[in-house]
Image (cartoon, rainbow, N blue to C red):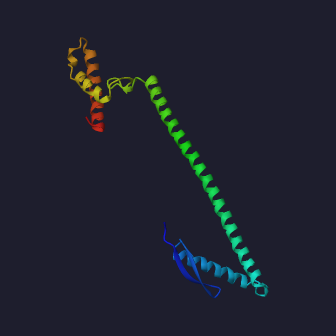
Amino acid sequence: MAEKNAVKVLIEGKTVTLGGYESSEYLEQVAYYINHKIAELRDMPGYMRQSADMKSILLALNIADDYCKAKERADALERDMESKDGEGYEVKQDLVSARVRIQQLERELAAYKQMHAPVQMGVDVRTGEISPDYRTLDQQIPAYREGITADPEAASDPSQAEAESARNEKYAKRSRRYVKNHGN
């Protein structure tokens, strides 16, 4: 249990001892508030002509008014906070739902790609045509290089050998350009 505090304060020119389990600073703050309220009431016309009982009642009414207004603000803030907590919960739920939907769409996309695009499109280095090919260009070039080294003179028709040689030279240039631009 907390320790009980007692502090002497001056309220309306009289020394009063306030006691409680709150800190001494808090008790002094309460006394300051009372003195401030009394000063406010003194500035009102007609207050000083009132009896001591009426002054006490007016002071109590002003303090009760401040309390009710502060409680109303606190209740409104609490309702607002609860509302925002509810909205925050809804936003979190929406976020979780969106993440689940994203994962579902990613799975659907992967399945679609797997079902509709099983063959990779590639460029045949020999013909320059785009065609379905499971091999990459890196895999095609060595095979192509082996084809270039084949002896064009081995062809049965001399005109075919010339055409094959010209074609091989053309593909060799493409191959060198590809290797130069993309590495081995």
Position of residue 68 in the picture relative to residue 161 (left or right): right
The quadrant of the rendering that contains the C terminus is top left
Residue drawn 62% across and 58% down? Answer: 78
Say which of 104 and 133 sits in front.
104
Extreme-top residue of the structure: 156
Say which of 60 and 138 sits in front.
60
Residue drawn 24% across and 11% down? Answer: 156
Quarter-of-image position of residue 164: top left
With respect to residue 75, does 29 lie above or below? below
Quarter-of-image position of residue 55: bottom right
**Count of numbered tags:** 0
Residue drawn 50% across and 39% down? Answer: 99
The percent position of residue 172, horizontal first and vertical second, equals 26, 28
Quarter-of-image position of residue 167: top left
Residue drawn 32% across and 23% down? Answer: 126
The percent position of residue 74, horizontal first and vertical second, equals 64, 63
Position of residue 99 in the picture relative to residue 44 (left or right): left
Position of residue 39 in the picture relative to residue 138 (left or right): right
The percent position of residue 170, horizontal first and vertical second, equals 30, 27
Say which of 174 and 142 sits in front.
142
Position of residue 164 in the picture relative to residue 128 (left or right): left
